Amino acid sequence: MRILALAALTIASPLPAQALSCAIPAQIERPRFDGPDAKTPARVLQTASYTLALTWSPQFCKGAESNPFQCGGANRFGFTLHGLWPDGAGKDWPQYCKPVELLSEATIRANLCATPSVQLLQHEYAKHASCMNTSADRYFQRSTGLYGQLRFPDMNALSRRPGLTAGQLASAIARANRGMTPGMMRVTTNRGGWLDEIWLCLDLNYRYRTCKADAGGVRPNTRVKIWRDER
């Protein structure tokens, strides 16, 4: 396993969610149209709550060389912003509520160090923001703003803790953020038991709330491994 040896990750105080190192190139790709299909159809439902989804970038980049901005070069990321998702009252959630335009270069540049994929930014806008009655800039100001307020524990140290569980990881993250408890998040892993994402549960006013029992993720006593990346 490669080791994440950033000096910044060895300090004891909570760390911000922002990129460890991010330089946006002079030229960036243009997004492609993103819309509903047979597997992810348009679904107009009332929003009952929200989820703020964060991706553990070292695990994502293991075998994701197709995204050189996030996974190659000098850029370095810990948790990145997957997106802000509206949730429904039941098992389904609203998605692709209406067609949206392609994101402007200015909007992409303003958010690329939080969500380091041009196409993912377009996807989140099309699939989720289209159901939130908001503009692209307001949607990303909200999601990137929530992400930027987050603090995280020493993930390098946690990755070395024998027998680390999802509940212990959630408790460590909650301790780093005022007003948050372990029950306000869900930890997801891949099939190998490696940390994949953290899902934070929010109410309609974008405040942390206790997650519903069916909000997904692994059980608190599930063992979790954290991939450490050194480049």
Image (tube, rainbow, N blue to C red):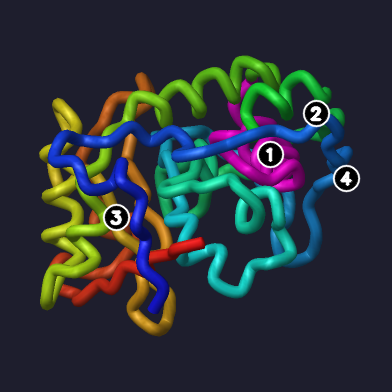
Instruction: Estimate the spatial distance between the alpha carbons at disc 3 and disc 2, rounded to whole Å.
Output: 30 Å
Quick one: label 2 or label 1, which is nearer the N terminus? 2
Instruction: Estimate the spatial distance between the alpha carbons at disc 3 and disc 1, rounded to whole Å.
Output: 22 Å
- Residue position marked by numbered label 3 in the rendering: 186
In the image, 95: left or right of 104? left
- Residue position marked by numbered label 4 in the rendering: 32
Q: Residue at x 16, y 34 (%)?
A: 13
Q: Is residue 94 shown above or below 148?
A: below
- Tag 1's secondary structure? helix
- Tag 2's secondary structure? loop
Q: Which mark lies nearer to you, 3 or 4?
A: 4
Instruction: Estimate the spatial distance between the alpha carbons at disc 2 and disc 4, rounded to whole Å.
Output: 9 Å
Instruction: Estimate the spatial distance between the alpha carbons at disc 2 and disc 1, rounded to whole Å.
Output: 8 Å
Query: For residue 66, what is the image quadrant?
Result: bottom right
Q: At label 2, which amino acid type do we have?
A: Leu
Query: For residue 96, what is the image quadrant?
Result: top right
Q: Which residue is drawn at 82% across and 25% down?
A: 105
Q: At label 4, which amino acid type do we have?
A: Arg
Q: Which residue is drawn at 72% across and 22% down?
A: 107
Quick one: label 3 or label 1, which is nearer the N terminus? 1
Quick one: label 3 or label 2, which is nearer the N terminus? 2
| Foreground of the two, 103 or 34 | 103
Range of magenta residues: 113-133
Mark 4 residue crowding within 10 angstroms, few (<14) / some (14–19) / many (20+): few
Task: Indicate which disc residue 162 carries.
Answer: none
Mark 3 residue crowding within 10 angstroms, few (<14) / some (14–19) / many (20+): many
Count of marks overlaid on the render: 4
Q: Residue at x 71, y 56 (%)?
A: 68
- Residue position marked by numbered label 1 in the rendering: 121
Whether residues under marks 4 and 1 lie with C-beta atoms below 8 angstroms apart, the answer is no
Q: At label 3, which amino acid type do we have?
A: Arg
Task: Indicate which disc residue 103 carries.
Answer: 2
